[in-house]
Amino acid sequence: MRPIFSVLQRAAPRAWQHPISSSARSPRTAFKLDSICARCRRQQTQVRFFNGQQMGDDQRWLSVVDHPAQVVRTGRKHGPGLIILALIPIISFALGTWQIQRLDWKTKLIAKYEDRLVREPLPLPPRVDPGVVSEFDYRRVYVTGRLRHDQEMLIGPRMREGQDGFMVITPLERGEGESTVLVNRGWISKKIMDQKDRPEGLPKGEVTVEGLIREPWKKNMFTPDNKPEEGRFYFPDVEQMAALTGSQPVWIEQTMVQDLLEAMDREAKGIPIGRAAEVNLRNNHSQYIFTWYGLSLATSIMLWMIIRKRPNEATRRVRQNVNW
């Protein structure tokens, strides 16, 4: 045993020295320290050599070249970024559930409007209560009277098939005892915005207009304010237009059969092209549902990948070899 211990003692590093001086150590303490140091040296020798072979000769040895080190996060708590990432799946899942409710509401609303479209048009009452207009939204009506072309208003710009133009709004004066209403006659090109360029589009005398009664619009934050003193209107402010023309705040959108030849003939003559008798509400809630739920799933997977603590296979095998 003495020769083996001498060889191990010579192979050990010379730089290491115990902080306790030799004078302060008792024989018993020195024996314990020497035993511990010998045990450490024996373990180092067993790790480096086994039966005269290096560990690289063992088939179970994992080289650092074949399995490079991985950067891991140790001894630190996750910052606020992890909290934000944890909130994203919850919020997006809630928004997806809300969009399901919105889809159900929008589907029922469109079905209600389409049911009104298939009914026969009703004559407009002599005087209309503006408070009940929302209950007749998209209801087909017809009204007879004389168009006040001198109070015509153009809303725009409005695009149609790549052409710039305007929507023509004209008050319709009805008979005695009946109120005046606003009629959206349709679209005209910007080239003929002056009335002198479209005489055929200014009918004289009594006319009958068939269209849809519509609820007043709400202005969004991106649309500029109307400038009635300059004759510029950017959105249909029914209350404002009714006050300017002495009409009731009732909006009628004139409809027509959508025929290409008819539309081209009207455009050439300067006659406004009316809208189709259909519901034009957008229903994109199915796409929103897919988007929000997909975001919730993706961020949930990302969160799981970040917070998981299970070691990978390579790390497990390295630990086994070290312990062995």
Image (cartoon, helix red, strand yellow):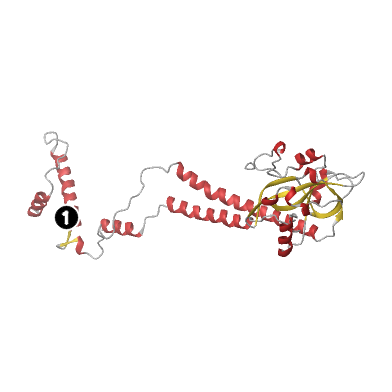
| Count of marks, rendered view | 1
The quadrant where residue 211 appears: bottom right
Inspect the image, locate mark 1, and give the three-letter code of the amino acid beneath it.
Answer: Thr
Q: Position of residue 293 (x, y in %)?
A: 56, 55
Nearer to us in this view, 117 or 235: 235
Nearer to us in this view, 279 or 297: 279
Residue at x-position 49% and y-position 52% = 299
Residue 309 located left or right of residue 127:
left
Q: Position of residue 214 (x, y in %)?
A: 77, 50
Give the position of the N terminus as an image quadrant. bottom left
Q: Position of residue 64 (x, y in %)?
A: 25, 57
Give the position of the C terminus as an image quadrant. bottom left
Query: For mark 1, does the 10 Å Cα neighbourhood hold few (<14), some (14 to 19), or many (20 or more) residues?
Result: some
Q: Which residue is mark 1?
A: 45
| Residue positioned most to the right | 176
Nearer to us in this view, 82 or 42: 82
Residue 247 located left or right of residue 235:
right
Q: Position of residue 148 (x, y in %)?
A: 82, 45
Residue 77 located left or right of residue 141:
left
Nearer to us in this view, 239 or 100: 239
Q: State whether residue 82 is above or below residue 66.
A: above
Secondary structure, mark 1, is helix
Residue 38 located left or right of residue 96:
left
Residue at x-position 58% and y-position 57% = 290
| Residue positioned most to the top | 24
The quadrant where residue 262 appears: bottom right
Residue at x-position 84% and y-position 51% = 204
| Residue positioned most to the left | 3
Residue at x-position 64% and y-position 40% = 224
